[in-house]
DNA sequence: AATGAATGAGGTTTCATTCAT
DNA sequence: CATGAATGAAACCTCATTCAT
């Protein structure tokens, strides 16, 4: 049995990456379902059928885009979590890391935001649900630690706060444009000020 | 021969409303594009073709759902804005009103969140872009008034803050379930605490 | 949950049958793979897409054709086997029944001949393999009984004979045309003469 | 510039043969249409495109496989026919020769069985139809001679008998595996016993 | 001889929509 | 009001084939 099926990873990984970047951009802009395979091919300067030399299906492109993004994201997150910082510093680091990921993988993040809920139901995208669970675990425990250590307000509804912070950060992918006037770290800092200290003047 | 269109506003407006509610629910859950007309019809207990007695097209259902929602939303918003409250009270009232809308039109809000960006490009959905502009105007001016009146922090990046608050509030539609343990007013109050005073303990 | 998916058996079973007969004819003539869904639709006087109102897929048409045929076939076979005739009479009845089935389901038999081997590997067509096993059982036991009762030659290689008779009968579907000059019973009789007594003159 | 065709008869004819044997095996197993050029290439340990260095097209592979087989078959048949044996001996020799061909060209025979009918319609494969005609001529005349010489039963329907014997022999290719426990000559002998003398005990 | 990448025609399938009943 | 059947455009995907390297 010499080969299996498609080249998959046989071919030059750079071409794959190029094509995936193109696809991610279009998925992010138009939505996965509304994106035709021809649109992607057009954008890549080839015919629709030619994409299938590199990928099994439209869905497998989506999967690879999301997996690649989540892998990198968790690299960053795990580094933060393993550093065992205080709760406030952990929260700051997670938020900053998140904005860096938005900077690097804007399209993937936008896709994730729009599509992950209904994708997670499919067997193939079970890894999304798993990531979501780990995500929740990391944030909830940080918030709990913070309340316990009295660095976060004692009256917080933890789950509500988790959703608040989580959405607050990730939705930024829908308007963020890399290379704009604010660096990801700058945006992170401003967000952290608002989240931690609020927008009202201290009285 | 005046028209040769469909009945449009046929007999019972209640049936229309029922069907639109069903459609909105499915659109919200699966995304507009991914929703087939048959799925809606199934859910409504009829055949796909029968929907066309009530509506011109799938798109016209979407339009009516969004228009109805935005009309009601602006009723509420305009009432708030016309009251000419102080900036902090205006912000509180807008946020509270928003959560009430999420409570009443959860599906429509979710659809709006997911689809409005790419819909707004179409002529037919120009009203979305217009609403967005008014929205932005209302919020930006409130924030500016607040900074001027020194009730909001002087160092705020107004546009960034606008996005922060806007997203933070509306994304809640993606997880909010009417009839849960928190009333919309309760959630609004918690959100406002976080937005205004932050989650960190005051030192 | 009102409905499931497609009408399946909802619609008029006569139309289904008509379409399946058309499809069977084309499958038999051109081979399943070489038959395009458009060709079937053309033959039925509709557009390709319209077939999907009645059937889930091209493959499901094939499945239904084969199932229907095998169901009827086994009705006939079981009647013969349940009659508990002598081995020679059983063989005669089975052969006659087979030619009757060829007469009634010529297309299905031809398809079965050409495609069953590679279809049987698929989960969906496992019923083909099962039928084949029952088929073999019926014939082998009849032949064995016959040898035991000394109505068939004692020197027969049972398995080889089984294949010989089986193929000999069913391949007739490839040239048989219903409504020709020979009735199925007539052909059966001639075949039986050859199979039982050979073509050589008795010496 | 005489030609601009492919090498066609390139360097080593052995490689061609190897590749054709591989192709024949796959065609026989999966059917010509269902066989992709990649599958053949996989089996041969190369990439699909590389086959086109050796052959013009998938169809030309099929043609060469069938031509080679028929050439050899007719070598054998012509030898038998030229020997001008008696009708019974001719029949025995033809059957035996056929099983030898099945032994040597099992894949080609299987392909021939499955595909020849619909291929014969194409200009390119007209040689199949011609072969079939010669085939029929050889067998019919042998049977007629046999009836005339009173070595075959006088009541035979010659055309029906022709089909009976022909199918009986060639279908064996669908189950025969070279190198099994029966030699082709052995199988031929058993078949001839059945065809000539039947399977019933003489009374 | 063979590879890697692409082409382009054509196939199956989906789905919004229409319309006679 | 609703059904049953069909349309037709467009989608995803397959695959034989080509060709520069």
Image (spheres, coloured by chain):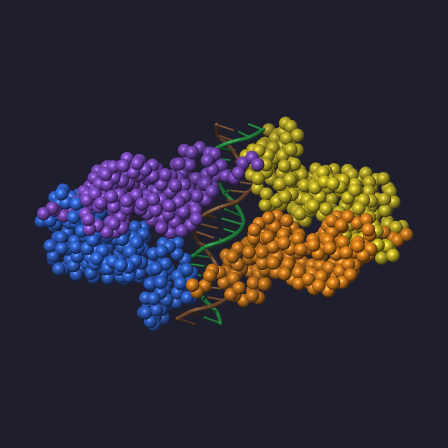
Chain colours: A orange, B yellow, C purple, D blue, E brown, F green
Q: Is residue D160 left or right of residue A148?
A: left
Q: Is residue B92 left or right of residue B10?
A: right
Q: Residue at x 24, y 59 (%)?
A: D183
Tell me what residue is drawn at x 63 percent, y 34 percent.
B19
B84 vs A65, nearest the viewer: A65
Quarter containing the N terminus of chain C: top right
Q: Position of residue B146 (x, y in %)?
A: 86, 50
> Along the line of sight, which residue is nearer the eye, C14 or C88?
C88
- Left or right: D43 as drawn, with respect to D172: right
Is residue A43 in view?
no
Counting labels gives: 0
In the depicted structure, whether residue B162 falls above or below residue B85: below
* Residue E16, placed above or below residue D49: above
- Name the residue located 13 percent from the left edge and 53 percent from the top edge: D88
Whether residue B45 is visible: yes
- Tell me where residue C101 sits by quadrant: top left
Q: Quadrant of residue D184?
A: bottom left
Question: Where in the figure is residue E18, as x and y percent of width and height?
Answer: 53, 36
Q: Judge whether A45 appears above or below C43 on screen.
A: below
Give percent across and percent down for residue A146: 79, 56
Q: Residue at x 66, y 60 (%)?
A: A74
The answer to whether residue C116 is above or below residue A69 is above
Residue lying furthest front: C148
Residue D54 locus on image (x, y percent) = 37, 66
Front in this rendered view, residue D133 or C31: C31
């Amino acid at each position: 049995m010499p080969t299996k099926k498609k080249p998959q990873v046989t071919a030059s990984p750079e071409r794959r990456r190029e094509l995936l970047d193109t696809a991610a951009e279009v998925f992010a802009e138009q939505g996965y379902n509304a994106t035709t395979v021809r649109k992607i091919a057009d954008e890549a300067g080839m015919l629709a059928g030619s994409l299938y030399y590199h990928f099994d299906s439209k869905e497998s492109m989506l999967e690879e885009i999301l997996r690649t993004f989540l892998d990198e994201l968790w690299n960053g997150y795990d580094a933060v979590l393993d550093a065992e910082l205080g709760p406030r510093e952990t929260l700051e680091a997670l938020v900053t890391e998140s904005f860096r990921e938005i900077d690097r993988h804007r399209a993937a993040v936008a896709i994730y935001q729009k599509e992950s809920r209904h994708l997670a139901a499919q067997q193939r995208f079970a890894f999304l649900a798993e990531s979501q669970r780990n995500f929740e675990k990391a944030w909830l425990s940080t918030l709990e630690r913070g309340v316990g250590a009295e660095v976060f307000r004692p009256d917080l509804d933890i789950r509500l706060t988790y959703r608040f912070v989580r959405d607050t950060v990730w939705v930024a992918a829908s308007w963020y444009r890399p290379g704009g006037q604010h660096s990801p770290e700058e945006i992170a800092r401003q967000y952290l000020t608002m989240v931690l200290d609020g927008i009202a003047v201290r009285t």
